[in-house]
Amino acid sequence: MLGNLMLPEDLFDELLGSFSLHDSSDEAVGGVFEAIPQSIATDGNANFAEPTIRISHKNDGKITFDRFRDRLRCELQNLGHKHTDGVIGALLALYSAHPARRRSPTSVLNAMLAKVVDGDLSQFFIFPYPPYPGFRTFKIGHFGIGELHSRKLRHRSERAGSDYFTLYGARLVDRFAIERDVTPARIVNLDELMKDMRSARSAGPLRDSGPDASKRTSKPWRLPISTI
């Protein structure tokens, strides 16, 4: 499947090389794409706004942004990834924060797409209260309903390289939850992707200003697209 994956450099380098994280105080030259919309996050004690992440790009090249986005959708579909517009936005935000993208615009994005791998998808819906007294856990099809299996959530978070349980696990113990059976899925290996970005960053500083896209997109549980 990966053998057919290739965005041609002669077609996409010009557009991809123009991508940069857009600061709202900057005057827009060309187009601006909203990669990740503003959202409200919480640390358990207070709510705060996560800023919108936008990408600026040129509009007068040989290929339009809309045509490029359609091609990216096709590549993800060919890789078997059940993507959404949110996934595309998160990938492009990460791409725009990648320190090596100026040197090799299209090859960097191709390398990111090569991080789509087979994985196991775990999904929990956790309510802000415990089960009713005397409630007995039961199962309907692929869904278990009852008290949260905290140890299971901790183990899977650690395996995925996430600090979610470390940050929030204590307040989730004994909560009412719905858990879906583990499901095979095509996912973006964010751990490997972030390793590549850190390696590239060690060769030189990140030159773009604006919202820190790498922080928001490196923790998929903080995104509106937890199945990236």
Image (cartoon, rainbow, N blue to C red):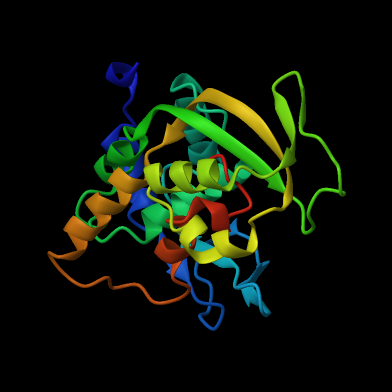
Q: Whole-percent x and y of residue 210?
A: 45, 76
Q: Residue at x 63, y 56 (%)?
A: 173
Q: As rendered, which of 205 and 25 lies closer to the eye?
A: 205
Task: Name the image quarter holding residue 42.
Answer: bottom right
Between 197 and 27, the residue placed more toward the observer is: 197
For the point 57% across and 28% down, the residue is 82
In the image: residue 17, left or right of residue 217: left
**Considering the image in quadrants, where does the N terminus appear?**
top left
x and y, in percent, of residue 214 in the image: 40, 62
Q: On the picture, is 85 further left or further right than 206?
A: right
Residues 145 and 43: in front is: 145
Question: Quarter-wise, where is residue 140 in the image?
Answer: top right
Q: Residue furthest left?
A: 203
Compared to 132, does 201 lie above or below? below
Report the side of 82 relative to 195 (left or right): right
- Total tally of numbered discs in the picture: 0
Examine the rendering and report whether any part of residue 88 can be seen. no
- Looking at the image, which residue is at 15% across and 69% down? 204
